[in-house]
Amino acid sequence: MRKPDPETLKLLRGYSEEEWLTYYNALVVIAKRECKSRYWKTGNAGHLPEGYSPETVVQEAVARLFDGRRTWNQEEYPGPSPMKILRATVQSIVGDLVRSEEHKHYAYLEPANDEDEPDSDGHADRLVHQATKKNAYNLPDNQDHTYALDNAIAHIRGNIRGRADIATYFELLLRGLKRVEISKEMKVSADRVDEIRKQFLTRTVDIYRELFGDKQSPRDKGARATRD
Amino acid sequence: MFEEDNAEKMFDAITGWVESADTMDLEELRQIRRAMGDDVEESERGFLSMLGKLKAEAEGKSPAQHGIGSLLGKARQLGLDAPALADKTGLSVVLVTKLDRRLINCLTVPKKVLEVLANALRATSDAISAYLEQPPALATEGRFRAKENPRTQKPQDFFEAVQTDKSISEERRANLLALEESEQ
């Protein structure tokens, strides 16, 4: 067992309960997004394998830092806040879990051994295999997904209509700009961007509940049912 | 703005505000989590409980470095019962119980299983290995009912235990049996 270095332990023991809860909740939100983002890519409902959840992934990341399985390299993650190292650890754990799940799918979907094929050229078995593969992957229908997301964007735009600053914030978000970049683009302080973000989320909370929730949009489900 | 086949990027852009989570205050984060449908209070209680244990371990006691007295006992210390340990490790309750009682030949347990157990129990693979290498433990239940003296069973091959486990899901069985090839 690796030991955490004394400096790291000193830092970890020094945070107040409120600081820990702030880190924890922020990391859970980040982990949820990581998981859900993979749903839109793989159609895998955003659930993690091995009984993990966004909460337990974050707890695992904190535990790894405490017991030394993850080293806090201060050159890579400088400063007294553990957020960056924990965030990287959370992303790494989610990535590993998803890769292992994908590996299992690939292993399962390896072509059948020719010796097991009763038909002479294996054509029938290959067809069955292809059909199984299609179902096993539960591949997202990109049209369904882009429709659902386009719909969400339209709803968000509708909800923030009349507030030019919030609308600008959202358009910049869609362009992939981060907080500081948005602040430069909007020529306001980063704190002001935070205020706009709060107002933005207040107006769009229902849409995000749907996006982050387990339930798919009715259109998404309907399209799948029709297709299936 | 987005390519037709790029739902993931669309989602990432729409939720780009999450990137700023580390600048949000506790109350805003709680509101966001509630909006996502989370039971924030319960989640925070669980986290603080775990944090308390981590801090206690870090204060010089380093229990993870000591020998393991029992896999299930160690799991209980971490708030995991047998089903939770089974879920966390991709095993079954039967398998974790057999491993706990050392009824499975240590030499046949795949490295990957040792690693997931070590991760779940916050121990090292070596510590798990050292535990499993000890002689099988007697069952603690029903010892007063037996007519004959209790005898320990001969340790079973891990993959045989997986194959004969009636309680394990087919998905987990397949995943575990797939390890046999990767071990060779």
Image (cartoon, coloured by chain):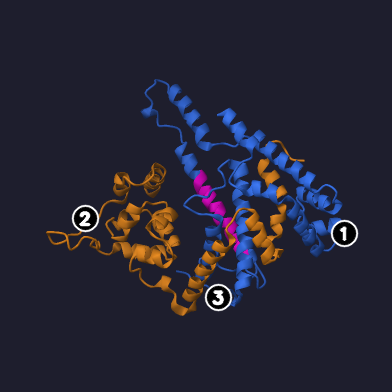
Q: Is residue A139 magenta?
A: no
Q: Are marks 1 and 3 in contact (CB under 8 Å)?
A: no
Q: Position of residue A136 (x, y in %)?
A: 50, 36
Residue A64 appears in the picture as rendered: no
Q: Residue furthest top?
A: A120
Q: Residues within 10 Å of mark 2 (few under 14, many from 20)?
A: few
From the image, tell me which residue sits under label 1. Answer: A187
Disc 1 chain ID? A
Disc 2 chain ID? B
Chain represented in orange? B
| Residue lying at 83% horizontally and 63% vertically, measured from the top left | A189
Disc 3 chain ID? A
Q: Residues within 10 Å of mark 3 (few under 14, many from 20)?
A: some
Q: Is residue A86 magenta?
A: yes
Chain represented in blue? A
Q: Please tell me the numbered disc located at residue A9.
A: 3
Nearer-the-camera pick, A1 or B153: B153
Separation (CA) of disc 3 from disc 2: 44 Å
B139 in relation to B56, above or below: above
B12 in relation to A189, above or below: above
Would residue B106 be found to the left or right of residue B84 on screen? left
Q: Which residues are magenta?
A: A85-102
Q: Amino acid at mark 2?
A: Lys
**Secondary structure category for the residue under label 2:** loop
Magenta segment's dominant SS is helix
Question: Which circle, 2 or 1, is nearer the viewer?
Answer: 1
Nearer-the-camera pick, A216 or A10: A216
